[in-house]
Image (cartoon, helix red, strand yellow):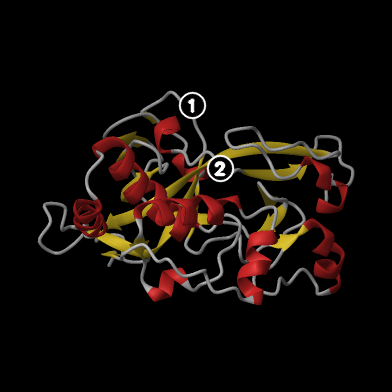
């Protein structure tokens, strides 16, 4: 839980790992998160605070943007009240909540969604995907593609690269394929203003209880699926231009020579229907 802590007058302890993190030009998510924590003087659990994040570390970003920033900026409550509200927000899926049938996910998961950003319902969810683990830290950088091929397509995290369809994220990391999205109810957010229920039917139709698909899309997290372009020819991560990364939040992913590209929206999944036993 989040607890209040008095502002410290001591100089922060410097370690090699923290210096490495701070010097990472792709670590904007870490910087944004720590800025909110410093501003509100909130002490986080050790399991969150001491874990080195990936540039798109979803656990920290979701906690900072979904819980801390809206409360601090919109409600303008005192730090003591902020701590209480933050604890309450993190307990949204607790057993005594009205949505007790929704099970909180820890860590959160990620939906790759395809549809009209202005729509609140639609079809085609059978083509959507689900990453049960944050695919960023498990990814392989573009410059590591040659070594990935030498390893028979097996990434250090254990997943296998598919040269017929492969994914990139906003920092140019090659990601594993998401799993098919099971039908059911999900609590989703884009870590901005809207957190709502997504209902996915067995026929692939989907409905948001509130807002539009754009409202629950997390803009800094970009993802795209690359497949060989019509007419054949090579389509590999080796053809991607590293200078195209990182991608601006909300912008489309860059094209890759020889490839067809399909952008997907990324939704944070905070909770799921208890009926979805495989998650």
Picture residue at 43% right of the left edge, 56% below the top:
38
x and y percent of residue 87 in the render? Answer: 23, 60
Question: Is residue 58 visible from the viewing direction of this image?
Answer: yes
The count of marks equals: 2
Relative depth, front residue between 45 and 164: 45
**Viewer-proximal residue among 126 and 106:** 106
* Crowdedness near tag 1: few (<14), some (14–19) or many (≥20) residues, C-alpha within 10 Å: few
Residue 182 seen in the current view: no
Q: Could you classify mark 2 by the number of other residues whose Cα lies within 10 Å: few (under 14), some (14-19), or many (20 or more)?
A: some
Position of residue 144 in the picture relative to residue 34 (left or right) = right
Instruction: Give the mark nearest the N terminus, 2 or 1.
Output: 1
Q: Name the image quarter holding the N terminus.
A: bottom left
> In the image, which is nearer the foreground, mark 2 or mark 1?
2
Instruction: Find the distance from the CA under tag 2 to the CA under tag 1.
Output: 18 Å
Q: Residue at x 31, y 56 (%)?
A: 271
Where residue 97 appears, as percent x and y from the top left, is 12, 56
Q: Nearer the viewer, residue 25 or 183?
A: 25
- Pick out the residue farthest to the top: 118
User: As rendered, which of 25 and 90 lies closer to the eye?
Assistant: 25
Q: Position of residue 195 (x, y in %)?
A: 31, 42
- Circle 2 is placed at which residue position? 220
Q: Which mark is residue 232?
A: none
User: Mark 1 = which residue?
Assistant: 116
């Amino acid at each position: 839980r989040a607890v209040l802590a008095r502002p410290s007058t001591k100089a922060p302890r410097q370690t090699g790992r923290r210096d490495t993190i701070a010097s990472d030009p792709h670590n904007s998510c870490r910087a944004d998160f720590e800025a909110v924590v410093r501003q509100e003087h909130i002490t986080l659990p050790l399991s969150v605070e001491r874990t080195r994040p990936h540039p798109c570390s979803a656990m920290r970003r979701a906690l900072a943007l979904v819980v801390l920033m809206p409360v601090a900026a919109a409600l303008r409550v005192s730090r003591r009240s902020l701590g209480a509200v933050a604890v309450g927000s993190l307990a949204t899926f607790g057993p005594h909540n009205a949505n007790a049938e929704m099970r909180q996910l820890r860590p959160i998961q990620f939906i790759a969604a395809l549809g009209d950003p202005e729509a609140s319902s639609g079809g085609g969810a059978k083509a959507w995907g689900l990453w049960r683990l944050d695919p960023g830290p498990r990814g392989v950088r573009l410059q590591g593609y040659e070594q990935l091929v030498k390893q028979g397509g097996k990434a250090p995290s254990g997943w296998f690269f598919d040269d017929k369809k492969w994914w990139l994220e906003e920092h140019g990391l090659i990601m594993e394929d998401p799993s098919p999205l099971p039908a059911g109810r999900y609590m989703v957010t884009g870590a901005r203003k809207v957190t709502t229920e997504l209902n996915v039917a067995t026929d692939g139709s989907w409905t948001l209880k509130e807002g539009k698909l754009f409202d629950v899309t997390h803009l800094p997290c970009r993802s795209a699926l690359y497949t060989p372009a019509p007419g054949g020819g090579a389509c590999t991560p080796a053809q991607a231009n590293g200078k195209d990364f990182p991608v601006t939040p909300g912008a489309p992913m860059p094209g890759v020579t020889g490839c067809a590209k399909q952008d997907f929206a990324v939704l944070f999944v905070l909770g799921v229907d208890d009926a979805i036993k495989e998650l």
